[in-house]
Image (cartoon, rainbow, N blue to C red):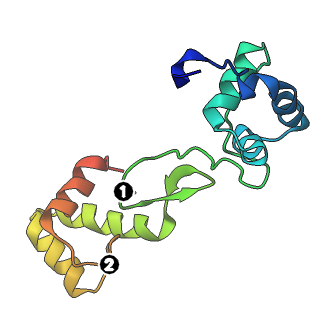
Amino acid sequence: MNYPHDIIAFFQNPAKSNFDEFRRLYLKGLSLNEASEQIGFPVSTVRDELIANGVPLRANNKASAKDPKKPARAFWGSIPYGYTILDGKLVIDPKEIKIIRKIMALHQRGVSFNSIAKTLTEQKVPSKTGRRWNDKTVARIIRRTKPE
């Protein structure tokens, strides 16, 4: 043996010899990450060996009983003036509907959007954002609201 390359040693794949342990831990309920930490093999090796040996993998569900899914929202974006969210649904806000009626009455009398906004700001009527009223917000409310 003059040269070290004259002898080639073949070793069995250690992951294949530990397949029974992979399967036992995974079927016990551990995740791939937990099983790989206990055994000391990478997650990809554990996953590949389980798949190669026909073990069906569980779906990757991040939501659990402790962390239930949030209910679907009925409305995306900012909530329009005159509406609020109740039980996930967009409903008319009784406090704000009075202001909308006032806006519509002023508009029907021929008052401009800018004048309506100034009037609401001077009367300290709260806007949805808490800021002062502007003509674009008033115009949007008037265009959206049908005459009653």
Few, some or many residues within 10 Å of mark 1 (<14, 14–19, 20+): few
Return the x and y of residue 44 as percentages of the image width and height. 61, 31
Return the x and y of residue 50 as percentages of the image width and height. 75, 22
- Specify which label sits upstream in the sequence, 2 or 1: 1
Residue at 10% x, 73% y is 115
- Which quarter of the rendering shows the N terminus? top right
- The amino acid marked with disc number 1 is Ser
Q: Is residue 47 visible?
A: yes
Relative to 143, 4 lies left or right:
right
Relative to 18, 111 lies left or right:
left
In this view of the protein, which residue sits in the foreground, 113 or 49?
49
In this view of the protein, which residue sits in the foreground, 114 or 24?
24
Q: CA distance from mark 2 to mark 1?
A: 14 Å
Residue at 52% x, 20% y is 5
For mark 2, give the secondary structure.
loop
Q: Is residue 57 visible?
A: no
Q: Which residue is disc 1 drawn over?
A: 78
For mark 1, give the secondary structure.
loop
Relative to 83, 80 lies left or right:
left
In this view of the protein, which residue sits in the foreground, 89 or 45?
45
In this view of the protein, which residue sits in the foreground, 53 or 55?
53
In the displayed orientation, state which residue is furthest to the front.
Answer: 2
